[in-house]
Image (cartoon, grey):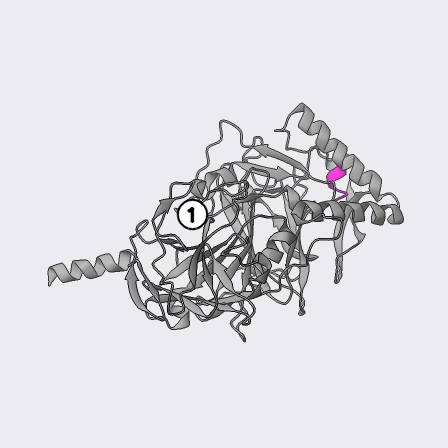
Amino acid sequence: MASAALLQRLALLTVAVQLTAAASGDTTATSTAAGQIRVNCGASVSAADSDGRTWDRDDAPSAGGGGVAAAASYEDPSLPSAVPYMTARVLDSTYTYSFSFPARRVFLRLYFYPVSYAGRAAGDALFGVAAAGVTLLRDFNASQTALALNAAYLVREFSLNVTAGGGNGRLDVIFTPSSDAHYAFVNGIEIVPVPADMATKPAPTLANGGRPDPMPIRADTAFQTMYRLNVGGTPVSPGADSGLLYRTWDEDSAYIYGAAFGVNYPKDSNVTIRYSSPPYAAPESVYATARSMGPNAQVNLNYNLTWILPVDAGFYYLLRLHFCEIQYPITKPNQRVFYVYVNNQTAQAGMDVIALSGGIGRPVFADYLVVTAPGAGQTDLWVALYPDVKTSPEYYDAILNGLEVFKLQTYDTNSLAGPNPPLPAADGDSGPRAKKKKRAEFVVGWAAAAGGLVAVLVGCFCAWAICRQKNTKAAIVDVPKKPVRETQALGLHGPTETYVFSVTAQK
């Protein structure tokens, strides 16, 4: 009895790594790590990736609906590793990968490298994916998406509750070609357990114009990771992530609006990162770098430090902003206080990182919920920071260390599926950097028409350049010598609506 009880407890702590095909019964794979599953789809042997993680062989049959195992026709030099991208499972009909798994929340990551497989054109792959009772992808075209993002490969990450779909300790990942003329494929499937309340607690604040209404999120909600940015820092690979969660953190500069980049800088050498939030919230490398507005208060009071993030319209989004003061002399409350705006709504007034976290070097994060307008296609999500002068802080500045954006499922249709992004323009520009270039061109034209704003942007850019040349750690701004007053800024026009930010100017 005691032995049986012990085995039962161990089963709850680790994931049984049975990989089964819905049409053909169970086949068993080897565990890659306690509580984690990784399948190198289409591969006949286990292999390690560039981070040293072992990916199991694919035991799905090549008969009875299991499609075929195929090798990629070409290895792009930008691939981070041959595993799992150089082999794929190609499917002509609906097929289910089924995993035995205890009831809990997990990250499900799907890896796609859209090239020709077994003589099939990459553009002919059009399919849907469902798991845990939620539609994750619909009519997904990996080739078009990669072209639009100027990327060779794609990783789609979802946070799912295994019990949400009635799986009774099983997670089914279902691939369905959109029609007889199309096929489905997948290069890798990764499942990583996460803390049960990692995405749902604390309750986020609704970004509704400064009325801080908490909006609790249902525990069974499914999420899709849209962005995970190391603000002011360099990309963080999965192997360098915290909590054995193996997340990827991208750098943020491709999403900054216009020429007003602010200043990115590292922590002081004598500052130690001491977690007050859970260590798995973000790795130390995220909190050890930051972006602020710049060293000149006069410039800071005339622009918003803004990120523009394309998202699918018609969904709720959870934004998680990571903060950590990492440079002296910011050690006390009311030294650096600022606004957080989301889509022209005041998500947070009086953001004071020291007051919120408890001291220098102490990480903390804040969650905000925003709803996008109903409709199809993509829209832009705006995140902006601006000094809050109401409490007369010592420095007129703002800071951000990390930014995550998660799409929430629709509860009426249980869907996370959005459209494929539009193909790049005829001039060949595509991807985030090209989008940033086009936005910068738009800013110049708009500012010329508005009159005077170009000078502000140029001044901001010059201040940033001078600061970078003299000392990349000069993140603290001067106090303006004149009192200030709040005025209304001109509208910054997005594709579907006009965003108007509050601006503070000298009297």
Q: Magenta stretch containing residue 300, yes or no?
A: yes
**Front-most of residues 35 and 291:** 35
Q: Is residue 227 left or right of residue 463?
A: left
What residue sits right under mark 1 in the picture?
280
Among all residues in the image, which is located at the extreme left? Answer: 1
Q: Residue at x 33, y 70 (%)?
A: 168
The amino acid type, in three-letter code, at marker 1 is Tyr
Magenta range: 298-305
Q: Can residue 275 be seen in this view?
A: no
Q: Which residue is drawn at 39% across and 46% down?
A: 244
Q: Which residue is drawn at 60% across and 66% down?
A: 315
Q: The N terminus is located in which quarter?
A: bottom left
Vertical placement of residue 103 versus 427, above or below: below
> Residue 194 at x, y = what percent?
40, 55
Q: What element carries label 1?
A: helix
> Residue 159 at x, y = what percent?
46, 59
Q: The C terminus is located in which quarter?
A: top right
Q: In this view, does 251 lie to the left or right of 499?
A: left
Q: Which residue is drawn at 68% across and 33% down?
A: 477
